[in-house]
Amino acid sequence: MARRRERHPRRQRPRARVAVQGKGVTMAPGDLITRPGQVQYGELLLGAGTPYRWRGITGWEDLPALDSGTVPRSDAHGAFPGGLLAQARTIGLDGLIIRAPRASVGAVVGALNAGTVPVEGERPFVAWLDERGPLLAYARATRRAVPASLGYRLGTITGGALEFVATDPRRYELTERAASAALPMSEPGLSWPLIWPLNFGTPGRTGALTTVNAGDVATHPVFEFRGPVTRPALTNLNTGDVIEYDIPLAAGDVLTVDTLAGTVTLNGTASRIYTATSRSVPEQTFTLTPGTTNLIFRAAPGSNDPTASATVRYRSAYW
């Protein structure tokens, strides 16, 4: 029988577009990776061209374990199909080999230890295996095995292993995608009296945005509404879902909606989730499914400042 899935509040993790900070250098996820056969965890590079080689990676191409809502039929054969929700993804680097000059093997092992210490938040984990290119997840190191053997005296340590756990089991493309739109504006048309060449005025705007999730699983976007605008809203034309917030935004204000974390913040700090209107769906349900999604940006009647905008940022997601 499928086990019952317990619901717990999701801890907010850094969004994929946030750079990694360390050693006084700003580093984006995957910046150190240059070729297939490499893995980058935070600022630690493993694999081809490094002192840390691995023979295999587990859990990366595998489908994560699933919690099933399927229940047996009480009066017939079979069961009623229920929803399938993925568990956390466990990633292992097996057959770890550490090679370094005997005089510096301790420093090389120390760098590995420092890069895989237990941490509170998840770090970018990027793996590049083949011609498809690198993919990104967010994970924490949960296991490290480095055998203490004669390898220290020879400069070659074999039989090591690393394990990482990603609470979000999806894998993402490295390049963040973005689309923006201003509020709708009709075309002014021809001006009278007619002057040649004809001037139709500034082209109109529809407030439409189009996104393309090239992956095979729904991804959670981040939306940014920029003022001046009152009661900004986005509608998913594919599903009819709406997110709308009864709040006036002044020029320079930014209302950020993180659909993965389920947060709504004004200017990066103050929570404004309580401004969601009755038309709004829960933020965490507003996703971009694989393929093309059409969105429209709207606001309260009379809110038509041409500098107001809505921006969606996302990455294609893969199982």
Image (tube, rainbow, N blue to C red):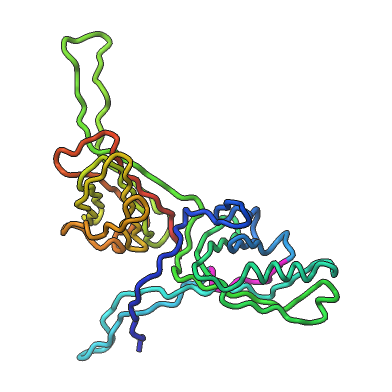
Residue 57 lies, in percent from the top left, at: 61, 71
Whether residue 297 is situated above or below residue 94 in the rendered picture: above
Whether residue 97 is situated above or below residue 277 in the rendered picture: below
- In the foreground, 291 or 22: 22
Whether the magenta-drawn stretch holds residue 55 is answered as: yes
Q: Is residue 132 visible?
A: no
The boundaries of the magenta stretch are 52-60
Residue 127 lies, in percent from the top left, at: 58, 62
Would residue 242 be found to the left or right of residue 15 on screen?
left
**Residue at screen point 27% across, 42% down:** 250
**Residue at screen point 72% across, 61% down:** 50
Would residue 202 be found to the left or right of residue 66 on screen?
left
Quadrant where the C terminus is found in the figure? bottom left
Whether residue 135 is situated above or below residue 185 in the rendered picture: below
Residue 157 lies, in percent from the top left, at: 77, 75
Quarter holding residue 75: bottom left
Whether the magenta-drawn stretch holds residue 151 is answered as: no
Residue 42 lies, in percent from the top left, at: 58, 62
> Which residue reaches farthest front?
270
Quadrant where the N terminus is found in the figure? bottom left
- In the foreground, 7 or 59: 7
- In the foreground, 172 or 150: 150
